[in-house]
Image (cartoon, rainbow, N blue to C red):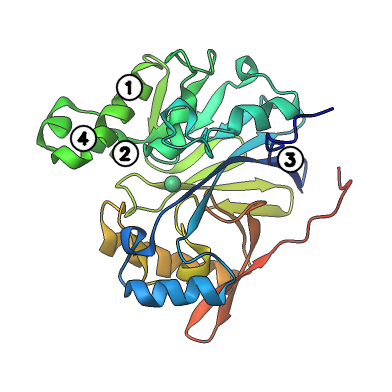
Amino acid sequence: MSDGSKPLPGVLRWNLGDLTVTVLNDGWFQDSAENLVTGIPAADAVGLQKSGHRPSDPRVTLNAFLITGPGRKPLLIDAGYGPLSPVDTLGRVPAALATTGVTPAEIETVLVSHLHPDHIGGLLGDDGKARFPNATLVLHADEAAHWLPDAALAKAPDGAKPYFENARKVISAYEGRVVEHRGGEVAPGIVAVPLPGHTPGHTGFRITSGSRSLLMWTDVVHLPAIQFAKPEAGVGFDVDGDQARETRKRILAEVADNGTLIAGSHLEFPALGYVARDGGGYRFVPELWVSGQQ
Ligand SMILES: [Zn+2]
């Protein structure tokens, strides 16, 4: 008998041409609209949560992604919160990854979208060492420059210092195995798409196989019930809220008009779908998942 008190891993495979994109749910965290939302009144955010049949205090989903396919080594995009998780509803990527049969030692590349702890904490094992002993980390040069230098930590406000310290801790566990980029192809069939604002080097990834393509837009949207309808709404942990808002508005218009299949770190599991224009804003249209599509 399984232990019914423990959640089953949240893991789902999608086909993309020859590739398999596996969504690995890391869990969720919850905070008040007052703490999370910027750019619109908190009461409006709560109203959108309620009309979207979501709790008044938003629950933020967190996903990482595994890319596999014939003739290629398994690749991760981000790694969840891992041992840095502040709550026990997070940190579930290792259990999700285990169900796929891919071992940490087989991961040779981790594409790092940005250096916030919910995306990189899982790069550490519970022992504080690299969880992926053979992996090279790939991240945007602006991201490294923002978080990692001694001078950046020194001048950070006290409240923000843990972000810098955690980024330095994780990256130092992979010393000598970090590659920086400025956009462009970062792995076969995967192009890094800079989406600055949430953080300076915040990056999405366009994954293409045959005639199919998916834009994993990382943290363009954290609060689906709010930000599709009101793209001007941001989150308090955007490093540059104005730039993040401009990036979000630009990408939402682009993917809606082009019919682009998207995925997101904070889109509700299983995290793939499309964006449709709806009144003055947008709405999310989940992709159809069918059992046994493999
Ligand atoms: Zn995030």
Residue 198 disc label: none
Q: Of 221 and 127, which appears nearest the observer?
A: 127
Q: Secondary structure at mark 3?
A: strand
Q: Of 75 and 6, which appears nearest the observer?
A: 6
How far separated are the C-alphas under marks 2 and 4? 15 Å
Say which label, 2 or 3, has the lower sequence index: 3
Q: Is residue 173 left or right of residue 38?
A: right
How far separated are the C-alphas under marks 1 and 2? 15 Å
Say which label, 1 or 3, has the lower sequence index: 3
How far separated are the C-alphas under marks 2 and 3? 28 Å
The amino acid type of the residue labelled 1 equals Lys
The amino acid type of the residue labelled 3 equals Leu
Residue 143 disc label: 2
Cβ–Cβ under 8 Å for marks 2 and 3:
no
Query: In the rendered view, would you say 166 is above or below 190?
Result: above
How many residues crowd around disc 3 within 10 Å: few (fewer than 14), some, or many (20 or more)? some
- Residue identifier under label 3: 19
Q: Is residue 261 left or right of residue 174?
A: right
Cβ–Cβ under 8 Å for marks 1 and 2:
no
How far across and how far down the image is residue 52, in percent?
57, 73
How far across and how far down the image is residue 139, in percent?
40, 34
- Residue identifier under label 1: 169
Q: Secondary structure at mark 4?
A: helix
Query: In the rendered view, would you say 260 is above or below 75?
Result: below
Residue lying at 77% horizontally and 30% vertically, measured from the top left: 70
How far across and how far down the image is residue 271, in percent?
63, 53
